[in-house]
Image: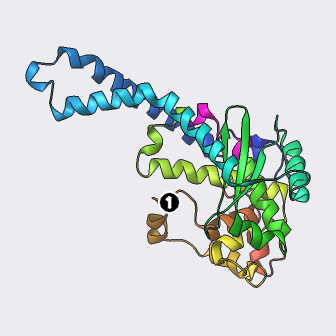
Amino acid sequence: MAKSHSGTSLRHPAEVPFYVFMVVLNLIIIWLIVQAAITLPFLPERFVDSGWATAVRSAFIGLLLLVPGLIIIRETQRASIRGTAVELSPKQYGDLYRTADEFAHKLGLPRRPNIFLANGNGTLNAFAAQATGHDYIVLANELFVNLYQSNREGLRFILGHEMGHVKLHHVSLWYQLSVAYSERIPLLGPALSRLREYSCDRHGAHLCPSGATGLVILASGRHTEHTTDIEELVRQGQRLRGFWVELAQLPQSHPFTVRRLERLFRLGLLHARVRGDTASSLQGDAG
């Protein structure tokens, strides 16, 4: 089990150092854009309409519009969700609504995120987001339906994972601004995203230690969470090594699902019966 219940202890140890690096890189990019824009009036006339000058002007305009642009996107996204999805309440899937209250209290959140059930058009997906004064989580219908009736623990894990994003401020405006440019850099942006996912997996497992099937359904698809052998899936994660595996992982925003599962068992955050030498090897920190 995790040694502490704080968000700090549940956060992947590499996330904050890598985030700090990305913030510094983001500031350098902004500084370069500003410096380039300052030099434009002093360029010889033959360079004024060059491709380089046009790119600098566009980048500078984008920088000026970054804050209002992000605010508009965040606010309109929440408005759209409110108009097209079902919001959970004491009378609308009240048991899951109460679970959200319970998790918010355990994580020490200042406000309980609103929970919405949306038509995901067949996708198994969920995400957390924020708008002014509101945190919210959206569960896609396909994911919800396949877990709600027969696998509440898996659904609780996914809800806890998304609440981890809220707890760790991944959805806040200041966080998004702090890595707005550096996160667009290939390989670096996905690397930070994967670390965030590892951190939030730890929150989901902390809140629901028996929710391994929340990841199983992402790996094997609908209607398989009760028939997939979790022990064997963890062993598969242990064998997931090698150059080509790491190369394939580099551009991905999420860690490989079987690796996520294996690391949570290795941390002792997920509970399941794992036989033989697997049990002893699943102790300790994934690092």
Query: Which image quadrant is residue 244 in?
Result: bottom left
Q: Residue at x 83, y 49 (%)?
A: 3
Q: Which residue is mark 1?
A: 252
As drawn, the residue found furthest toward the top would be 42
- Quarter holding the N terminus? bottom right
Q: Amino acid at mark 1?
A: Gln
Determine whether, in the image, residue 70 is placed left or right of residue 181: right
Q: Is residue 166 magenta?
A: yes
Which residue corresponds to the image point at 21% horizontal and 15% vertical from the top-left?
Answer: 41
Write the residue at 12% across / 25% down: 47
Q: Which residues are magenta?
A: 165-176
Say which of 11 and 57 sits in front. Answer: 57
275 left or right of 258 in image? right
* Image: 40 above or below 286: above
Q: Can the viewer see residue 271 in this picture?
A: no
What residue lies at 44% left-to-right and 34% top-to-bottom?
25
Q: Position of residue 76 (x, y in %)?
A: 59, 40
Query: In the orientation shown, which residue stands out farthest toward the front?
Result: 83
Image coordinates of residue 260 in percent, x first then y, are 66, 64
> Which type of secondary structure does the marked residue at label 1 adopt?
loop
